[in-house]
Amino acid sequence: MPAVSSPEAVASAVHAPLREATFLQDKFGRAITDLRLSVTDRCNYKCVYCRTGNDGEQYAELALDEYLRLARVFVSLGIAKLRLTGGEPLLRKDLVEMVRELAKLRTPTGEKLDIALTTNGHLLAELAQPLKDAGLNRITVSMDACDAATFARITRVPGSYERVLAGVRAAQAAGLAPVKVNAVLLRGFNDDQIERFAEFSRHENVIVRFIEFMPLEEDRVWTPEIVVPMREILERLGNIRPVVALPPNAASETARRYTFDDGIGEIGIIAPVSLPFCGHCSRIRLTSDGKIRTCLFSQMDHDLYGVMRRGGSDEELAAFIRKVVDQKEARHHIGEPGFQKPSRSMVHIGG
Ligand code: SF4
C-alpha cells in the first residue's frame, strides 16, 4: 500500500499563507474551498456498482430556498466552487432555477461562484442549454461504458447509452465544453472499455476520466481485486499510442492528466485507492437532507439543517460549519487493517 500523506505532510501541503481567518480551513491547514451539494438521492438508473439494490433507503430533500440559504452561508465562508450532485440532480424540477439563483452569489472577494454539475446524462439533452443560460459553468457526465450493450448492462436501463451520448453532445453545443466524462472501472465488468474510451475522448473531444472503484456501494461488494489501478490503466493507454503527462490545473485537482503524443484527446485518472490525494483535499459535502460530511469516508454526519430548522441564524450556521470543518479527517484508510466503510453509500452522499 503506497504511503499516504501523513498529517504533517498534509499540513505542509498548504501553499500560500491563508487569507483572513474568515475562510474555511481544517486543522491540517487545508483550505476548504469546494462544496459538493447533493440535491436529491433519487436516481433514474440502478448502476450495478452503486445501487446494488437492497438498502432501499431514501433520504429527505430540502426546499429550494433552504439549499440556497445554506449555499449562501457556505459561500460567505470562502467556498468558491460548488458542484451539484445526487443521486441524479436533473430529476429536480427546480434545478435550472437553483442554478440561476446560485449564479447570483459572490464570494467574499467579489468573485462569481464556479458552479458545476455531475449527472448521469439521461435528461441532459433537453436541459443542457437552459442550465448553461442559467449560469452553469462546468459539467461532468458519469458514463461507465461507450457501447450500448455494456452501458445498459451497467445502468440496468435499456436505451440509456444513446440518450447520454445525445446529452454529452447537447452540453458541448450549449458551450459547456470541455465536457468531462467520468468512468468508474470494475475488473471483469467494464475494464474492457479503456481503449474504447480513449478513442471516445479523441473522437468526441471530451475529457475522459477513469476512476478507481472505491468501497462506497450499497451492498458492499468492493474488494481490492476488483480495482483496476492507475498503473494498469496507463499501461493499457500506452499500448494505443505514447501517453504524455499534462500539468495539473490546480493543486487540489483529483485527476492526473494525460494526452497522447499527437495531442489529441485528454485522459484523466482519479486514483483514490492506489495513489490517494487527501493531502490537498479542499472538499466537503452537504447531503440532500442537509448533513455535512467532511470526507467521502466519514463515519458520521453533522446535522447543519437541524440548526436551521431550530431557527439558527446565519452566524450560528457559519459557526457550526467552521466547527465541523475543523474535525475533517486527514485521509481515508482504504485497504488498511481496521478500515471501516463509510456510514452512507455513494448514492446517499453525492459524488
Ligand atoms: S478520501 Fe476524504 S480526505 Fe481523501 S480526498 Fe476524498 S474526501 Fe478528501
Image (cartoon, helix red, strand yellow):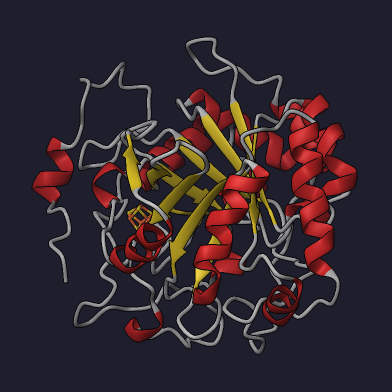
Residue 36 seen anywhere in this rendered image of the structure: yes
Question: Which residue is located at x 74 percent, y 51 percent?
Answer: 62
Callout count: 0
Q: Quadrant of ligand 1?
A: bottom left
Instruction: Please indicate whether residue 216 sits to the left or right of residue 199 in the image.
Output: left
Q: Quadrant of the C terminus?
A: bottom right
* Above/below status of 193 relative to 271: below
Residue 349 seen anywhere in this rendered image of the structure: no
Question: Which residue is located at x 25 percent, y 69 percent?
Answer: 333
Question: Which residue is located at x 66 percent, y 65 percent?
Answer: 146
Q: Position of residue 308 (x, y in %)?
A: 62, 44
Q: Which quadrant of the structure image shows residue 253?
A: top left
**Which residue is at the front of the view, 44 or 140?**
140
Question: Which residue is located at x 64 percent, y 61 percent?
Answer: 143
Q: Quadrant of the N terminus?
A: bottom left
**Residue at the left extreme, as displayed:** 8
**Which residue is at the front of the view, 342 or 318?**
342
Instruction: Please indicate whether residue 73 sits to the left or right of residue 338 in the image.
Output: right
Q: Which quadrant of the structure image shows residue 66?
A: top right
Q: Position of residue 293 (x, y in %)?
A: 46, 56
Q: Position of residue 112 (x, y in %)?
A: 60, 17
Q: Position of residue 337 (x, y in %)?
A: 19, 82
**Which residue is at the front of the view, 209 or 310?**
209
